[in-house]
Amino acid sequence: MENIFDCSYYWITKRGLQCIGQWPFRSSKEKRILRCLTFFMITSFLTPTITKCMTSLDDTDVVIESLFIIGIIGLGFTNFFNWTIMEDNMIRLLLTIERDWKNLIDQRDIELLQQHSERGRKLSVAFTILLYFCTPAIPKILDFFHPLNETRPRIFLSPTEYFIDQEKYYIYILFHVYISVPIYTACIVFFENFFAICVNHACGKFEILKAHLESLHLDGTILIEETSLADFYFIKNRIRICSDLQTQTLQFVDCLESSYRGALLLAVGINIGLIVLAGTAAMIKNSEPSELIRMVCIGVDLIFHLFYSSWLGHTLVVQNERVLDAVYQSEWYRFSNRSQLMLLSIMMRTLKPCQLTAGKLYIMSMQGFGAAMRTVMSFFTLLNSMR
C-alpha cells in the first residue's frame, strides 16, 4: 500500500492528507490528533475574521474582504468534514487504485495508466502552486529586490480583529496567519488533488478499455475471422475481460460520485456566490483602478477553480464516450451473432452518461460550467440594474 502511494503520482497528495489527518491508513489516534489540530487552527483564524466583519458593518471594503475569506474557509471546512464522514468511501477508492496497479500485466495497459496518472500529477502540482501563492510576502520581496527609504505599508492577508494593537503585534499576527492559511488552503488543494487523481485514474481505465475493444479482432497482428469454435472462445474471453473492466471502472466512478456529490454542491454554490461578490465589488470600485484589478483577479481565480473542477468531470464524460467509438472500431461485423450480442451489453452501458454531479443539481462538465457562468452574468445584470 505505502509503496504504491509513495510514487511520484500520489506522493504530494498523500503527504498533504497526512498533515491534516485525512490519510485513512494512519492510526486512529494520529488521525484524531491531527484533525483536532487542523480544526483548531482553522477556527482560530475564522473567529477573528468573523469578528472583524461584524464590528465593521459600516465599512463596505472590510465586509467584502471578510466575506471572501469566510467563504474560502467555509469551502475548506466543507472538504474537511466531507473527508471525515466519507472516510470509508475514500478507503475503497484508494484500495481500488492499488488493486488496479497490481493487476496490470500488459505493458501497453501499464503505459496508458501511467500517462493519465502523470497528467494527474502535473495538474496537482500546478494547482497546489497556484493556490499557495501568499500575498503577505509581497512587501518583503519588493523591499529585498528594490529597497526604499521608507517602509512600505504592511499588508495583512485578511481583515481580522484580535482586540490588540495589530501594528505592534504584527509579527505574531503574521505568524498565526502563515500557520493557519496553509492549513485551510490544504483542505481545498488536496480535496481537488485527490479528486483529480481519481478522475485521471478512471480515465486511464477507460483508455485501457478502449484499447482492448479496438483490438478485439486481432491476435497480435493476425486478423481473427471467428470461423472456428476456438476463435469464438478467444473472442468471448476478450469481451468478458472488457466487460469486467467496464464494470469495475463504472463502480469506481459511482463510488467517487457518491463521495463527492455533497461537498461539490456546497463548493459550487460557494464558488458562484464569491464570483458574484467579486463582480459586485468590482462594479462598486470601478473608480479605484488598484481595487478594481484586485477584485477582477480574485474573480478570475474563483472562475478558474470552478472551471478546473468542471473540466475534470468533463474529461470523464468524453473518455466514456470514446469507449463507444472503440466498439465500432473493433470490426464487430466480422464476429458471429453470439459475439455481437455479448458486445451489446458494453454498448448499452456506454450509452448511459458517466458523469459526476454536485448534489445531482450541477453536472461537472463544460456545459455545466457554461450554465453556471450564465447564472453569474444574470446576477451581475440584476445587481447592476438595481444600482
Image: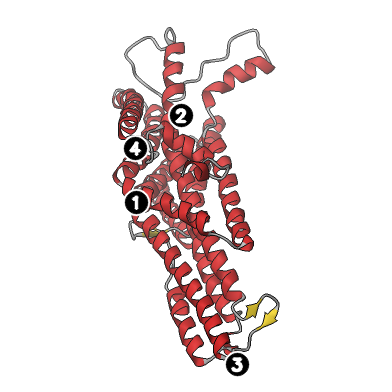
Q: Look at label 4 and name its amino acid.
A: Phe
Label 4: which secondary element: helix
Query: Between tags 2 and 1, which lies in front?
Result: 1
Q: Is residue 159 visible?
A: yes
The residue carrying pointer 3 sits among few (fewer than 14), some (14 to 19) or many (20 or more) residues within 10 Å by Cα, namely: few
Q: Which disc, if any, is residue 38?
A: none
Query: Which one is earlier in the sequence, the residue at label 2 or at label 1?
Result: 1
Between 183 and 339, the one lying in front of the other is 339
Residue at coordinates 43% horizontally, 69% vertically from top-left? Answer: 353
Label 1: which secondary element: helix
Q: Look at label 2 and name its amino acid.
A: Pro
What whole-number distance in Å separates the C-alpha atoms at marks 2 and 1?
26 Å
Query: Which one is earlier in the sequence, the residue at label 3 or at label 2?
Result: 2
Query: Which one is earlier in the sequence, the residue at label 3 or at label 1?
Result: 1
Label 3: which secondary element: loop
What whole-number distance in Å separates the C-alpha atoms at marks 2 and 4?
13 Å
What whole-number distance in Å separates the C-alpha atoms at marks 3 and 1?
46 Å
Q: Which disc, if any, is residue 77?
A: 4
Query: Which one is earlier in the sequence, the residue at label 4 or at label 3?
Result: 4
Q: Look at label 1 and name its amino acid.
A: Asn
What whole-number distance in Å separates the C-alpha atoms at marks 3 and 2?
64 Å
Query: Which one is earlier in the sequence, the residue at label 2 or at label 4?
Result: 4
Query: Label 2, on which residue?
Result: 182
The residue carrying pointer 1 sits among few (fewer than 14), some (14 to 19) or many (20 or more) residues within 10 Å by Cα, namely: some
Q: Is residue 21 left or right of residue 373?
A: left
Label 2: which secondary element: helix
Q: Which disc, if any, is residue 227?
A: 3
Measured along the vertical axis of the image, is residue 102 above or below residue 145?
Answer: below
What whole-number distance in Å separates the C-alpha atoms at marks 1 and 4?
19 Å
Query: Between tags 1 and 4, which lies in front?
Result: 1
In the image as oriented, which residue stretches furthest toward the front? 230
Do callouts 3 and 2 mark residues in contact (Cβ within 8 Å)? no
